[in-house]
Amino acid sequence: MNNCLSSFFKYLLYFLNLLFVVSGIFLIVFGALMLNGLGNFVHFDGATVVTFPITFIVIGSVTFLVASFGCCGTIRESACLTKLYAICMLILFGLQMALSIWLFVEEDTFLGFMSGIVDKAWKSNDAAHGYPMDALQIALKCCGNEDYKQYGDHVPASCCGYDDRFQECLEPIYTRRPGCKDAFLDFWYSHMEVVRLNSLIIAFFQLGIFFISCHLARAMRWD
């Protein structure tokens, strides 16, 4: 009976590890898409803007490596590798829960901070600073800090998605575009919703895998 139960846990753990390999790849791709969505705006205050996408890529990479490590330990039926894998999974669970709780508790603080970045870009939107609003307006298809009216009669070409500042931006295009502060906050809010949900799901799966791994490691030592 014990051998049957251990075999069941072995294949269950292997299957869950495959799911975690996929989830690791998902987080890597998700972070890369976030970086791509920000376009050249990462060059303005980049250390702040890229923190979250880079965090997702790092977590995804670690998840992928640990899950691959777990697959090897399960297939080889190594009690030492499986125990080490369980410890790694417990650490990942703690980090994942910390990230999830922080995203729920500090959402308003985070979004307020991101709003300040757009204000900073707007105040620094001159030749000396490289017109940081251009990168944001092209990446998020927005115009102005609050709306296009802040530019008066001189709406930049980036409000129409053009890189060339000397190109004419037509009114039917820029009048339909939202303000960049709202667009920037919507960008982060929508991505935070995805991350919070997935972080909680992955965290509880990690906790379950920790207990399964501990049982399997104990069974391997008995064998």
Image (tube, grey):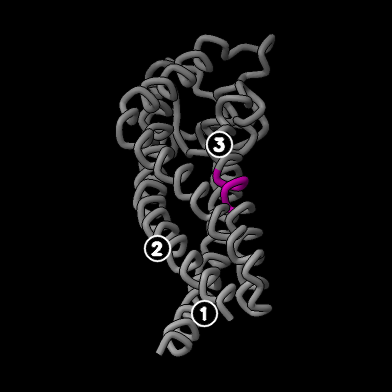
Residue holding disc 3: 138
Residue drawn 64% across the image and 53% down it: 61
The magenta region covers: 56-60
Task: Pick whichever, 67 or 150, lies toward us.
Answer: 67
From the image, state whether disc 2 or disc 3 is nearer to you: 2
Mark 2, Cα crowd under 10 Å, few <14 / some 14-19 / many 20+, is some
- Say which element carries label 3: helix
| 89 lies left or right of 188 | right
User: In the image, is 110 to the left or to the right of 85?
Assistant: left
- Name the N-terminal-most of marks 2 and 1: 1
Q: In the displayed structure, would residue 169 be above or below residue 133?
A: below
**Residue situated in front as seen by the camera: 148 or 32:** 32
Residue closer to the observer: 90 or 136 = 90
Residue 57 sits inside the magenta stretch:
yes
The three-letter amino acid code for the residue at tag 1 is: Lys
Decide: few, some or many residues near mark 3? Use Cα within 10 Å; few <14, some 14-19, many ≥20.
many
- In the displayed structure, 25 sits above or below 39; it is below
Q: Residue at x 49, y 86 (%)?
A: 7
**Residue at which label 1 appears:** 10
Mark 3 and mark 1 residues within 8 Å of each other at the beta carbon: no
Q: Quadrant of the C terminus?
A: bottom right
- Structural distance between the alpha carbons of marks 2 and 3: 44 Å
- Find the distance from the CA under tag 2 to the CA under tag 1: 13 Å
Helix, strand or loop status at disc 1: helix
The reply, left or right, for residue 13 in relation to residue 207 is: right
Return the disc, 2 or 3, that comes first in the chain's sequence. 3
* Three-letter code for the amino acid on which mark 3 is drawn: Ile
